[in-house]
Amino acid sequence: GEVAVLEMSGVTLEQVAWKVRPIALLRGRLQATWSTRFGEGHVTGAASISPSGDLHLYRSTGQIAASDLQRFFSLPVGPQGRISLDLEQIELQLAPLYVHSARGEVHWQGAGLVTPYAVNWGDLVARLGAHEGALRLELGDQGGPLRLQGQAAVLPQGVLQLDLAAAAAPGADEALRAGLAMLGRPDAQGWVRLRF
């Protein structure tokens, strides 16, 4: 089936299409492949739901403009660049939220913010995993003005934990250095630590 426009929790998806695999019902799962347009981007993948309500997403790929994320969040600054999703699989329980397993990567190419002028961060990556019900993200840079290393986690209670270190690379724009200094005092090697 397909619909031209689908609105969920204030987010508009366009050209949503799906194909149900009836054979999966013999194994007690509702399974389908799907695709959608989101702003200027697209996402495709496969999903199944078990009788217990566990959701399993797999082989999900796509690209969206980072600026389209403002549809989800009310941000005082505008993200820039493109976000690529390569999700091998994620299996989770929805209520209450509990991530059983996750594998994949999210790449943010040309990452940065417009605050009112653009601050370039370079290319960033998040590698997905799961531990004790939490979605874990291993964060890093791929060379560029912003050096980044650390972890983030979305806990089963919906709480975000963050433990990362960021530094400006040699030759980075002064606006990036000033922005990092606003987040905290750099250590002797120039790294600013953020934990919450």
Image: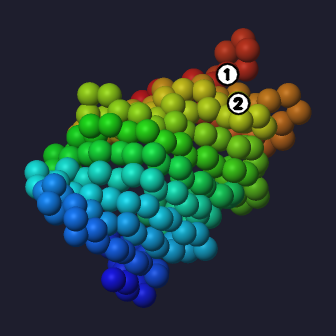
Q: Residue 171 at what x, y percent from top left?
A: 88, 33
User: Which quadrant of the figure contains the N terminus?
Assistant: bottom left
**What residue does disc 2 label?**
147
Q: Residue 110 at what x, y percent from top left?
A: 73, 51
Helix, strand or loop at label 1? It is loop
Tag 2 or tag 1, which sits nearer the N-term?
2
What's the residue type where badge 2 is placed? Arg
Q: Residue furthest top?
A: 188
Helix, strand or loop at label 2? It is strand
Q: Residue at x 27, y 37 (%)?
A: 100
Q: Residue at x 78, y 37 (%)?
A: 144
The total number of labels drawn is: 2
Q: Residue furthest right?
A: 171
Q: Residue 11 at what x, y percent from top left?
A: 40, 72
Residue 13's tag is none
Q: Are marks 1 and 2 in contact (CB under 8 Å)?
A: yes
> Taking the image as drawn, is residue 14 in sight?
yes
Mark 2 Cα-neighbour bin, 10 Å: few <14, some 14–19, many ≥20: many
Q: Is residue 181 left or right of residue 17?
A: right
**What residue does disc 1 label?**
191
Q: Residue at x 41, y 34 (%)?
A: 129
Position above or below: 191 against 116: above
Mark 1 Cα-neighbour bin, 10 Å: few <14, some 14–19, many ≥20: many
Q: Residue furthest bottom?
A: 4
Using the image as rendered, state which of residue 44 and residue 193 is in the foreground: 44
Position above or below: 165 against 179: above
